[in-house]
Image (cartoon, rainbow, N blue to C red):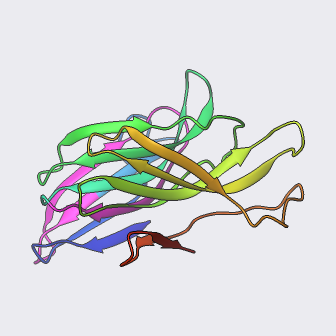
Amino acid sequence: AHIAVCSDKGYIFVGGSNSGGVNPSNGNIRISKLDSLGNVAFTKFFGLSLAEQASCVEPTQDGGFIFGGSIKTPNDNRTKPYAIRLDNLGDTLWTRTYTPPVGNGSGNGFRTIFELPDGSFLGGGQEFFTDSISFGRRDGLIIKLNPNGDTLWHKTYRIPYMNANGTDFEIKDIRPTTDGGFICG
C-alpha cells in the first residue's frame, strides 16, 4: 500500500481490498482519494479474477493520478507490470499491462511509478528472467512510458558479478536527477 499528498492538500492511496471489485474473494486493487478534510472524493476498484498487487500511486501534473503494481492475466496466467492512468475525478484514462519478454514469476511488476516533466512516465520494479544460462533470476526493471502508456523502452538491471541462480534484484524507488538521468535503489 502507498499514500501520496495531492496538490489540493488531499491524499490518494492504494491497497488491496476484499470488499469490492471484480472478484472480492481473491482481492482487488483499491484506489481512494480523500479531500483535505478527510472526506472520500472517490474509491475505485481494479483487477481481474486472479492476483493483483497494489504498489504505488502518484499525482500527475494535470491533477490526475498514475498507479503502478502487478496483475495476473487469465488468458496466459502470467503476472505482469500493470499501470492505470486516472483523471482528477478518478475516471480511467487508460490501463496497460506490460508482458515480460521471458519468464513468469509472482515478482513481475512495478514497485514505483511517476510522471516526468515531459508527461512521460517511469516505472521501476522487478522482472523474472530465464535464459539458456541462468534459470529463474529476478532482475530490477525500469520501463519508460509515453503519456498514453505505450512502452518507449524496457530495461532490466542487476549487479554484474552477482549472476547466481536465486539472486534477486528489485527497483523499489527511482527518481530523476538534475543531469537528465535517474537514480534508483
The extreme front residue here reads 179
**Measured from the top left, where is residue 159 in percent x and y?**
75, 67
Residue occupying the point 36% across, 42% down: 46
Q: Magenta segment, principal secondary structure?
A: strand
**Measured from the top left, where is residue 112 in percent x and y?**
45, 62
Q: Nearer the viewer, residue 113 or 117?
A: 117
> Magenta region: which residues?
32-61
Residue occupying the point 30% across, 72% down: 4
Quadrant where the N terminus is found in the figure? bottom left
**Measured from the top left, where is residue 122 in percent x and y?**
40, 57
Residue occupying the point 76% across, 61% down: 168
Q: Can residue 17 be seen at all in this image of the molecule? A: no
Residue occupying the point 72% across, 62% down: 158
Q: Nearer the viewer, residue 110 or 183?
A: 183
Q: Can residue 147 be seen at all in this image of the molecule? A: yes
Residue 51 location, quadrant: top right
